[in-house]
C-alpha cells in the first residue's frame, strides 16, 4: 500500500480507473476482508505484553483487545451473543475469521448456536469493507454530479455576460439619432439666416 491509508485505497478503487496497481490493491483488500493481515497480527503479538489491555479499531468498530498467556483475545460485544453468558472473549489468532470463544476464565465455551453465530460474525466482517466501498462509490457519483452542475452553471453565466458586453458595445458605437427639438432648432436658425441675407441685399 505504500503511504496510502485504507480510505485512500478504497477511494482509488471506486474512482473508475483501472490499472495494474489498482488490481493489486483490490486483490489485497479481498485477501484481507477482515481488515487484519498476518503482519498486523504479528505486530499485535509482539507489541502487547501479558495482561495488557488495548483498543483495536477494526471493521469500523473499537474492540477491546487483551493478551493472556501469549494469546490475543477480543471482547465479544455482538448483540447476537447477548443471551450467551458463557461467551465473553473471542480468540484472535488468524486472519481468516476462524476463532474460539472462551468464558471469563479464558476456558473454551460453546454457544448454544455456535455454528450459526460464528458464520454470522464471519459474514459481517467480510461485508463491512464492501459496504464501505459502496458508500464511497455513491458519494463519488454525487460529487461528480455536483461538479458537473457547477460547471454548467458557470458556462451559462459566462455566455450571458459575453452577450451583455456585446450589446453594450454595439449601443456605444452607434451614432446618436437627432431629436425633433434639435432638428427644429436647426431649421429655425437656417430661416433666420436667410431673412437676414435678404435684408442686407435690399440695403
Image (cartoon, rainbow, N blue to C red):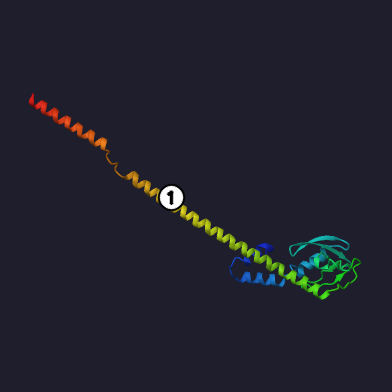
Q: Is residue 57 above or below residue 185?
A: below
Quarter occupied by residue 196: top left
Q: Is residue 89 above or below residue 164?
A: below
The reply, left or right, for residue 135 in relation to residue 38 is left
Q: Position of residue 148 (x, y in %)?
A: 53, 59
Of all residues, the one furthest to the top in this rendering is 203
User: Is residue 148 visible to us here?
Assistant: yes
Q: In this view of the protein, which residue sits in the foreground, 23 or 199?
A: 199
Q: In this view of the protein, which residue sits in the foreground, 191 or 4?
A: 191
Query: Label 1: which residue?
Result: 161
Of all residues, the one furthest to the bottom in this rendering is 115
Q: Is residue 151 above or below residue 177?
A: below
Q: How many marks?
A: 1
The reply, left or right, for residue 195 in relation to residue 140 is left
The reply, left or right, for residue 21 in relation to residue 64 is left
Quarter occupied by residue 69: bottom right
Q: Position of residue 52 (x, y in %)?
A: 86, 61
Q: Position of residue 75 (x, y in %)?
A: 84, 64
Quarter of the N terminus within the rendering: bottom right
Q: Position of residue 184 (x, y in %)?
A: 23, 35
Query: At x 12% / y 29%, what residue is drawn?
Result: 197
Quarter occupied by residue 56: bottom right
Amino acid at each position: 500500500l505504500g503511504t496510502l491509508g485504507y480510505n485512500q485505497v478504497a477511494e482509488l478503487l471506486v474512482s473508475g480507473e483501472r490499472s495494474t496497481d489498482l488490481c493489486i490493491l483490490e486483490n489485497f483488500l479481498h485477501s484481507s476482508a477482515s481488515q487484519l493481515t498476518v503482519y498486523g497480527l504479528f505486530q499485535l503479538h509482539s507489541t502487547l505484553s501479558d495482561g495488557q489491555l488495548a483498543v483495536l479499531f477494526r471493521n469500523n468498530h473499537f474492540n477491546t483487545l487483551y493478551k493472556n498467556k501469549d494469546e490475543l483475545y477480543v471482547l465479544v460485544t455482538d448483540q447476537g451473543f447477548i443471551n450467551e453468558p458463557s461467551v465473553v472473549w473471542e480468540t484472535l489468532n488468524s486472519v481468516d475469521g476462524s476463532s474460539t470463544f472462551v468464558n471469563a476464565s479464558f476456558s473454551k465455551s460453546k454457544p448454544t448456536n455456535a455454528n450459526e453465530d460464528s458464520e454470522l460474525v464471519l459474514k459481517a466482517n467480510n461485508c463491512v469493507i464492501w459496504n464501505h466501498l459502496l458508500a464511497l462509490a455513491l458519494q463519488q457519483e454525487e460529487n461528480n454530479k455536483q461538479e458537473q452542475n457547477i460547471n454548467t452553471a458557470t458556462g451559462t453565466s459566462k455566455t450571458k455576460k459575453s452577450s451583455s458586453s456585446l450589446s453594450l458595445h454595439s449601443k456605444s458605437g452607434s451614432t446618436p439619432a437627432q431629436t425633433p427639438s434639435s432638428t427644429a432648432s436647426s431649421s429655425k436658425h437656417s430661416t433666420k439666416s436667410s431673412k437676414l441675407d435678404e435684408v442686407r441685399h435690399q440695403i
